[in-house]
Image (cartoon, helix red, strand yellow):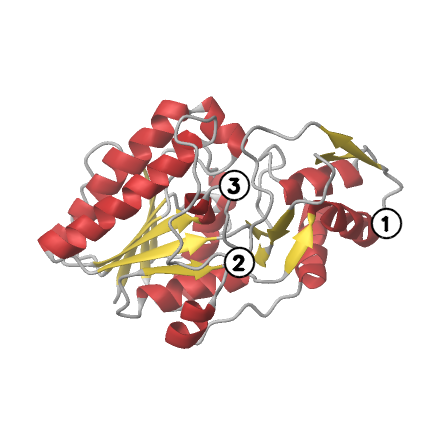
Amino acid sequence: MTTSVVTGGAGFLGSHLCDYLLDKGHRVVCLDNLDTGSLENIEHIHDDHFAFHNVDVIEHIDIEERVDYVFHLASPASPIDYNRLPLHTLKVGSYGTHNALGLAKFKRARFLISSTSEVYGDPLEHPQKETYWGNVNPIGPRGVYDEAKRYAEAMTMAYHRQQGVDTAIARIFNTYGPRMRVNDGRAVPTFIDQALRKQPLTVFGDGSQTRSFCYVDDLVEGLYLLATHDVHEPVNLGNPEEHTLTELAEMVLDVTGSPSEIVNEALPIDDPQVRQPDITRATSLLGWTPKVSLRDGMTRTVDFELQR
């Protein structure tokens, strides 16, 4: 049986990946220290081929059994989390990635790191291709996350080039869906929570800044296809359909039927004005394109919140 280790496996994205891998017939070893993940995300899994270990990846990772894939997803990923845990975010990107790569090397496993579109910073290229080097403020409040991921990518490529580890780098763009934390701080869960509570939807800035939102099922499929391919260079994974934050807020109001109004607040420091992936590489190499429309995905996410 193919065995996959998923760091950060009790998080939003990690828990969906665990589900997907189990459906593919993998044995899944889920590692998480529950700083930002939750046992609630994996409590539905009743499978003899699933194991959870409370592990902080900044410490040595010891897996006794054979491992075929290491999916390194562990990291605080929202502004609220990495501003609350700045040093730990940097340590996860450095020590955590080093330990996860060490596991993959020891087990001769394929290694996939979940990097981020944040490596592009506030981009001067639009849409963003993998060849773009980014426009990042290393000492700004977002720098702890941006630079942790950029460092993690550099370490991943160093392990590949010098140590011969079979590696892949997924640059993940905005992803949403069921199991996102209400207090995550990102636009989709915040807007849905505010709408369901009939509170004003808070849009930062004038709302003209754009994002591209990928439904979690599509994203997880992309991670699997990348892990089972032989490409080593970074690959963008995200939905190239671009929306302003005002458009997103209006869609949430429409889907929920909420009477809430939209209010504007001050724009956070270094908040990107545009964010849209060029997925040519993912399409040509992996045959991957997102299938779930924003409205359909938003409806599924709202339905999940209503059933909680």
Residue 295, x across and y down, in percent: 72, 60
Q: CA distance from mark 3 to mark 2?
A: 36 Å
Residues at badges 1 and 3 in contact (C-beta under 8 Å)? Answer: no
Residue 244, x across and y down, in percent: 70, 50
Is 215 left, or right, of 266 in this rendering?
left
- Amino acid type at image mark 2: Pro
* Within-10-Å neighbours for mark 2: few <14, some 14–19, many 20+: some
Residue 106, x across and y down, in percent: 11, 51
Check the picture and name the quadrant holding the C terminus. Answer: top right
Residue 77, x across and y down, in percent: 47, 38
Q: Which mark is residue 257?
A: 1
Element type at mark 3: helix
- Amino acid type at image mark 3: Glu
Element type at mark 2: loop
User: Which tag, 3 or 2, sits closer to the chain's start?
Assistant: 3
- Amino acid type at image mark 1: Gly
Is 73 left, or right, of 302 in this rendering?
left
Is 294 left, or right, of 148 in this rendering?
right
Please give the residue where the numbered disc 2 appears in the rendered image: 127
Please give the residue where the numbered disc 3 appears in the rendered image: 40
The residue sitting at 72% across, 57% down in the picture is 299
Task: Name which quarter of the figure residue 214 lies in.
Answer: bottom right
